[in-house]
Amino acid sequence: MSVTTLQQFAARDAGAARALGRRRSLIDRLVTALCLLATVVGLFFLASILATLLWRGLGALDWTVLSNEFRPTTYGDDTLQKGGLLHAIIGSLIHVGLATLIGTPVGLLVGTYLAEYARNSAFGNAVRFVSDILLSAPSILIGLFIYQLVVLPMGGFSGFAGVLALAIIVVPVVVRTTEDMLQLIPNTLREAVIALGAPKWRMIVLVCYKAALSGIVTGVLLAVARIAGETAPLLLTSFGNNVISTDLGSAMASLPIAIYQQANSGFPDLIAIAWAGALLVTLGVLAINIVARLLLRRKS
Amino acid sequence: MSDIATNPGAMPVARARRTAGAFGDTLFEWLCKGAGLIVLLTLGGIILTLFVAGLPAFQHFGLGFIFSTNWDPVEGREEFGAFISIFGTVVSSVLAIIFAVPVAFGIAYFLTELAPMWLRRPVGTAIELLAAIPSIIFGMWGLFVLVPFVQMNIQLAFGEYLAAIPLVGFLFESNSFAGTSLFSAALVLAIMILPFIAATMRDVFEQVPPVYKESAYGLGATRWEVVRGVVIPYTRTSVVGGIMLGLGRALGETMAVTFVIGNANRMPQSIFDPSTTIASVIAMEFPESLAGSLQQSALFAIGFLLFFISFVVLATSRWLLRSRLKG
């Protein structure tokens, strides 16, 4: 009798173990399937956005869009001249170029300070913290700040104000990559340079910058990609303009603002132009991002 | 054989060069320090500007400004309260987190545990590129693609089935059929912050020492049991930090939300009602407001509140991620 009970127990345990094992592997497979699904969903959104942009943007992108300034809607009348985005393209190039030119040196110096002078000082930690906050802070608030600081005293919206707002966004991006890249440089390299009798600033400028060059360039490229599509702060600073203007003292057009205004106009022909602009901005931003990544990968 | 031995005159020259080096060092250090000071002053300037310019509104409405649901910019009966926009900001962002976190976890799990090596980099890069797309593009895509989809396929079905649930059913009722709603905004926000959260999770999952995982595998644990029992407990703090970072981004997002939320300054009754957020109100009304008006001051005041909220969230996130920053 006792033997049969033991056998029964053994049999029941093996059965229970098998059932448990089946349940565990079932749960595992279920989670695996859900995670695969999540990845597909994430990639699907990227594909959907790119497909929409290509489909609607390529249909609207032609030479007129690239060579004309803004014109009001034609109401489908083909005899009227169609408008374009030339004013916005020129405006965006000015905005992005000048903002990068202003923001990069400041970001570079701050990143240098954090990596070379203040790895553990209280002031350095404060700067690092504030720079990280600025990196993720709502960009529209930077617009409000520049409005109060520049637009009100100057008496109106201006390209200069827009450039300044974008420059504030450039700084923390460059700071982060510069600091990270400088910290990757081995200290033995620094010691070797100092041992040759070079002052610290020459070590930083001639050796460290050179060693970290591709990383720093990556940071600048990422900053350019970030501000090229930035819209909210420009709404409160350079405001947008319907004609080609290179005057930094008055309102200036930019691609994101032109897209925003024409996408919300309600006229199909203007919305088509907005899609063309959206395609230009996105392709530009993605191209810069991919170049930046390749640059960094070749380094590492 | 030094210069000094052969030519004593070289001594002063060498000293002069060294002082020039010392001077260059001081100059360069102060230049770097000054740039750091600019960064501090910028943030200080933003806080001060928002507060000072918003002060008239704070003084005019007192503490009631935060809790009032009135927002009426019409001249003569101006009345401003921040509650509706604060509510819309917080609800849309929290909903976005609820949508995004499970998907982000799935992507991180896929990229660290499931995917074959050759697939990890391209998929990871594709997800990161999603983060590079400008917010205005998300807004346009949301308005012309996502909103019609929500309107036709999600809102109707939810309204039909979920609205029948007692007590919470009203949250899913369709009172507005425009399709622009809190739900659409949360969905677009979720897609935008997805890559940030997924990238943080992937990075911290990769930092788990292989020995821990191997010992769990050695005990016969399945892949999911290893992640649930070893990886998640080990990385919990940083994962929460990554989620807070996504929340911080969502709170201040402007253009994408402005396109799809409907910009209605009234209290939403269900998640399919149009609403508004602080950033959208500023983007919609600021360019048309008069300099020095009470409306403009109220816009600065809600901007100050937005800064306060996102500062707290971002600072918390950074604190939680501190171990990763050090490593």
Image (cartoon, coloured by chain):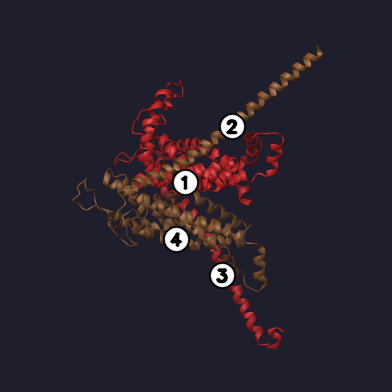
Q: How crowded is mark 2: few (under 14 residues within 10 Å), some or many (20 or more)?
A: some
- Considering the numbered disc 1 on the image, is that residue within a helix, a strand or a loop? helix
Is residue B197 something that shows in the picture? Answer: yes
Q: Nearer the viewer, mark 2 or mark 3?
A: 2
| Disc 2 target residue | A29
Find the distance from the CA under tag 2 to the CA under tag 1: 28 Å
**Gap between marks 1 and 3 measured at Cα:** 42 Å
For label 3, the residue is B27
Q: What secondary structure is found at the residue carrying circle 2?
A: helix
Distance from label 4 to label 3 (Cα)? Answer: 24 Å
* Nearer to us: label 1 or label 3: 1
Tell me the chain of label 3: B
Which chain is red in the picture? B
Question: As shown in the figure, which amino acid type bears the numbered disc 3?
Answer: Leu
- Compared across the picture, whether B177 is left or right of A5 comes to left
Separation of disc 2 and disc 3 at Cα? 62 Å
The local crowd at label 1, few if under 14, some if 14 to 19, many if 20 or more residues have their Cα within 10 Å, is many
Q: Mark 1 points at which residue?
A: B130
Local secondary structure at mark 3: helix
Instruction: Name, please, the residue furthest toward the top.
Output: A1
Q: Mark 4 points at which residue?
A: A100
- Residue at mark 1: chain: B
Q: Dot 2 falls on which chain?
A: A
In which quarter of the view is residue B59 placed? top left
Chain that bears disc 4: A
Under mark 1, the amino acid is Leu
Q: Can you name the residue that lies furthest to the right here? A: A2
- The hue in which chain A appears in the rendered picture of the protein: brown
